[in-house]
Amino acid sequence: MKEILREIGMIARALDSISNIEFKEYDLTRGQYLYLVRICESPGIIQEKVAELIKVDRTTAARSIKKLEMNGFIVKKEDEHNKKIKKLYPTEKGRKIFPFIKRENDHSNTVALEGLSEEDIENLFDLLQRVRRNVEKDWEFVKKGNKRSY
Amino acid sequence: MKEILREIGMIARALDSISNIEFKEYDLTRGQYLYLVRICESPGIIQEKVAELIKVDRTTAARSIKKLEMNGFIVKKEDEHNKKIKKLYPTEKGRKIFPFIKRENDHSNTVALEGLSEEDIENLFDLLQRVRRNVEKDWEFVKKGNKRSY
DNA sequence: TTATTTTTGTTGTATTTGCAACAAAAAAAT
DNA sequence: ATTTTTTTGTTGCAAATACAACAAAAATAA
């Protein structure tokens, strides 16, 4: 059995670790860049969706986003028609550092893909998307308290 | 720019989350399965190497491994010729749950790779290994306190 | 319409994570 | 042989993470 997941875990931890170190320069603490990127990309998104996108616990997302708000990177806005939800928007400060996050991520991407051809990259991306779609089904299933049988 | 790393991050977090939930049944707390697997696979390995393999902070590995020891899954043994290092070995208890961890990981692998052909899988594995080798260079560089320029 | 279930958000608590700083052994350089 | 650097391991501390449990709005079912 090819240990695909092990490779993926190693890559993910290594890159996350690098990003966290590099973003301290912009006063972003561990993990925060993930949330800020998603909010910048989809202004008005709610935190429940952000957690789903990132694949992180709801309460972890709640606290990270609260901290982003406290530090002035984003704001929460009430919705006109739905009293329950809070829409998330980047502030000026948040929008300003977004390009730096993108730049760092692009660099990591470039480093990661060194030596791969254009075709390799297309192929890898396609395969990873398929894997991700497979995996997110199980994640939602298990997160809701269900038990996988195997 | 194809967001390869984003896909990898999503997959890794989702699967890690599932594993952590599923391994509570065996009294393994968050993250511990990673260390136990590596120690079972390479008896006598030292914790510094385990951290490198997993791509996790040295001190995090130290504490996880200490806990594995306290809970009787592994033992630390002094080396004859080197007073500094401590070699790690699974105990009977550790060896016993190893197959369950393997089984769970295999299942996750299978789910993840659903719909991919044999060739796709070979290809994906090869590409991921190359990405991982690229990324670990930067990880070690940054972890040692160096600054990437981009 | 009313009752039930799902969605969304929060807080309390325990645990994990990782940076900083230290110590000691080992290895390498002088 | 001595000094310097690297390797390996530890602890203090601050912060992130996630499970449990709760609450209220919204969506769905009855």
Image (spheres, coloured by chain):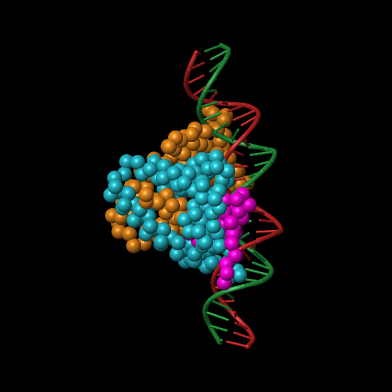
Chain colours: A orange, B cyan, C green, D red
Depth check, front residue: A6 or A44: A6
Total number of numbered labels?
A: 0
Q: Is residue C18 above or below residue B29?
A: below
Q: Is residue A63 above or below residue A79?
A: below
Who's the residue at 43% across and 52% down the image? A6
Who's the residue at 60% across and 69% down the image? B84
Depth check, front residue: B27 or B43: B43
Q: Is residue A92 above or below residue B114?
A: below
Quick check: is B76 in the magenta stretch?
Answer: yes
Residue extent of the magenta highlight:
B52-81
| Residue A79 falls in image quadrant | top right
Depth check, front residue: A91 or B140: B140
Q: Position of residue B21 (x, y in %)?
A: 53, 40
| Direction from residue B26 to residue D23 in the image, left or right | right
Farthest residue in the front direction?
B92
Q: Position of residue C16 (x, y in %)?
A: 59, 50
Say whether residue B148 is visible: yes
Who's the residue at 32% across and 41% down the image? B115
Q: Position of residue B75 (x, y in %)?
A: 58, 56
Image quadrant where one finds the C terminus of chain B: bottom left
Quick check: is A140 in the magenta stretch?
Answer: no
Q: Position of residue C30 (x, y in %)?
A: 56, 87
Say whether residue A38 is visible: no
Q: Is residue B44 above or below residue A38?
A: below
